[in-house]
Amino acid sequence: MNRKVLGLLMAVVFLAGVRAYAHHSFAATYFEDKRLTIEGELVQFLYRNPHSFVHVMAPDDSGQMQRWSIEWGGGGQLARQGVGRETLKVGDHVVIVGDLGRNPADHRLRMRTIVRPSDGWKWGGEID
């Protein structure tokens, strides 16, 4: 009996370590002290785990239209915060504030807030 308990305990510790090792650091991908606001049209909403993404066509600093990739929380986490697969639709006009990606050529943000001005819907929760 003790061997089974020890084996189970070792498996739990191993799996917890694998999960912690596999989860990347946002600080490695995004500047946590540099925020950017973009405004544009939603072109794709990927509602999934471990992270969801929205893609928005919006101008960059020079006014050129770019496809921005905005990393968001996982589907399960967003569902607990009231965001579902049908919350956002292609063509929605949105305003997003996010942490700027470390590589400017990627046009990437980490979601902080999102607003859909047409009906006032907004999200400003926490993500892991």
Image (cartoon, rainbow, N blue to C red):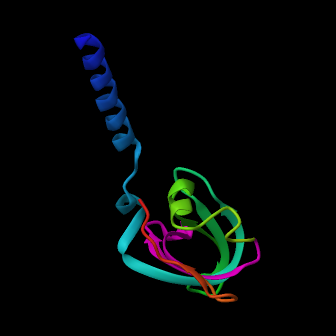
Q: x%, y% of residue 62?
A: 59, 86
Q: Please tell me which residue lies in front, 45 or 102.
A: 45
Answer left or right for 95 relative to 45: left
* Magenta span of residues: 90-114
In the rendered image, residue 112 lying in the magenta stretch gets the answer yes
**Which residue shows up at 26% across the image and 10% down it?**
1
Q: x%, y% of residue 71?
A: 53, 63
Quick one: which residue is furthest to the right in this view?
91
**Which residue shows up at 35% across the image and 41% down it?**
21
Q: x%, y% of residue 94?
A: 64, 82
Answer left or right for 24 relative to 108: left
The C terminus - image quarter: bottom left
Q: Quadrant of residue 114?
A: bottom right
Q: Please tell me which residue lies in front, 48 or 9.
A: 9
Q: Is residue 111 above or below residue 35?
A: above
Quick one: which residue is furthest to the front in this view?
1
Q: Is residue 117 above or below residue 90?
A: below
Q: Quadrant of residue 87?
A: bottom right
